[in-house]
Amino acid sequence: MNSWYVYFVRCADNSLYGGITTDLKRRVAEHNNDNKKGAKYTRTRRPVTLVYSEQCLDKSSAAKREYQIKHLSKKAKELLVQSQ
């Protein structure tokens, strides 16, 4: 069974972009190199660097956690990133 991860990447403009995936290395590579699979948001903010990841039990719990984290303030997100 694949593990699911919630992650944040830091973009070249210092913004944070979050998502979920089963393969962190592949997903970061897609954000940096693939115009079709990488998120539209990160395409104009390359390169991106993985700055936070959190393992979850399944896709549902990863999606719920992503929702929680994305609704945090920018300051709270930065504290979360620094805590890792």
Image: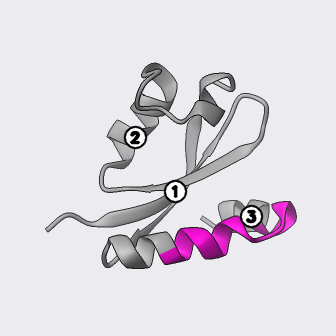
- Residue at image location 78% in from the left, 37% down from the top: 14
Rendered location of residue 20, percent (x, y): 45, 58
Answer with left or right where residue 81 lies relative to residue 27. right
| Amino acid at the residue labelled 1 | Tyr
Residue 73 falls inside the magenta stretch: yes
Residue 84 position, x and y percent, is 59, 64
- Mark 2–mark 3 contact, CB under 8 Å? no
For marks 2 and 1, give the CA distance. 10 Å
Q: Inspect the magenta stretch and tell me whether residue 1 lies in it.
A: no
- Three-letter amino acid code at the position of disc 3: Lys
Instruction: Read off the residue under disc 2.
Output: 27
- Residue at numbered disc 3: 77
Coordinates of residue 53 in the picture (x, y in percent): 49, 60
Residue at 42% across, 22% down: 34
Q: Which residues are magenta?
A: 64-76
Circle 1 sits in a helix, a strand or a loop, which is it? strand
Instruction: Reply above or below: 45 against 23.
Output: above
Q: Which residue is mark 1?
A: 7
Asked whether, in this view, residue 24 is left or right of residue 68, the answer is: left
| Left or right of 45 in this view: 26 | left
The one of 59 and 29 positioned closer to us in this rendering: 59
Majority secondary structure of magenta residues: helix
6 or 80: which is nearer to us? 6
State which tag comes first along the sequence, 2 or 3.
2
The residue at the point 68 percent across, 35 percent down is 11
- Where 15 falls versus 55 (above or below)? above
Q: Secondary structure at mark 3?
A: helix
Residue 56, numbered circle: none
